[in-house]
Structure formats: C-alpha cells, structure tokens
Amino acid sequence: QVQLVESGGGLVQAGGSLRLSCAASGLTFRLYAMGWFCQAPGKEREFVAAITGSGGSIYYADSVKGRFTISRDNAKNTVYLQMNSLKPEDTAVYYCAADRWVGAVREGADDYNYWGQGTQVTVSS
C-alpha cells in the first residue's frame, strides 16, 4: 500500500529554519506530482507548495514565496520542504500529498490521492 511519511518538524524560533522530508513507498514516485499542505488548529487545510513529477514545474502559495523551497529526489522517493525565515503564523501540522496528475501543480487538497500523517511545526515568537 502507499505510504507517505513526513519527518523534520519541531520547535524553532521565529526567523529560524526547518527542513521537512516526506518519504514515499508503494507507488512509482516519479509518476506523481507532490504537494505540501498545512493545517493550523481551527483552520482549513491550506496549500503550501507543489512540484511536478519531473521537478520541472513548481508552485508556491503567496504566503511562503521567497521563504520556502520545495524539491524532490526521485532516486530516493523523497520530497522536501526547506522552510526559512519562519514566522509564528507558520505554526501548523504539515502534510505531504501525492497527486496522480504528474504534470500538474495543483492547490486543491481534493486533487491529491494520498496523504501522509503530518508533522508538527511550531514557531515561537
């Protein structure tokens, strides 16, 4: 079965950095676009970033442009989210997700077929 396992979350001070990883198994990783989403308490799940199967197209939410970088290593079946200049409002559970539409970078959570369990990111002020 498909598994997506996030890691790398934690507690960091404002202005700090974290690197999230998402290791995929049970699917042909290069044939899936990948996305990162976040969900803060009491809020809807929000789009953060997405990358096509080849890594050739990338899309970010306006709130993270210039601070976060999504990348992938198809040889390792892993997608990453480098998070710099973190703000308290970035505090949330971060989820990775896989989209069968390999050539698209999509914002809608409903477009994604598989989800990880999430990793907590807490940014203190």
Image (cartoon, rainbow, N blue to C red):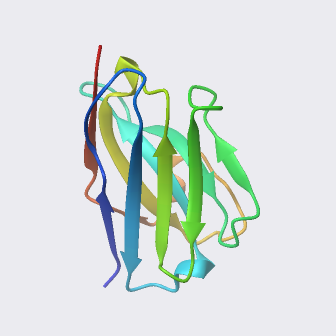
Q: Is residue 79 above or below residue 25?
A: above
Q: In this view, does 90 lie above or below 88?
A: below
In the drawing, does residue 68 fall left or right of residue 24?
A: right
Image coordinates for residue 28, horizontal then vertical, percent: 52, 86
77 or 3: nearer the viewer: 77
Image coordinates for residue 73, horizontal then vertical, percent: 56, 72
In the drawing, does residue 23 fall left or right of residue 52?
A: left
Quarter holding the N terminus?
bottom left
In the drawing, does residue 24 fall left or right of residue 7?
A: right
67 or 115: nearer the viewer: 67
In the drawing, does residue 59 fall left or right of residue 42?
A: right
26 or 122: nearer the viewer: 122
Q: Determine the residue positioned at 24% across, 27% down.
A: 41
Looking at this view, name the residue that lies furthest to the top. Answer: 125
Quarter holding the C terminus?
top left
Quarter of the view holding residue 93: top left
Quarter of the view holding residue 103: bottom right
Image coordinates for residue 10, horizontal then vertical, percent: 24, 41
Image coordinates for residue 31, horizontal then vertical, percent: 61, 80
Q: Determine the residue positioned at 43% across, 27% down.
A: 86
Q: Determine the residue positioned at 60% across, 34% down.
A: 61
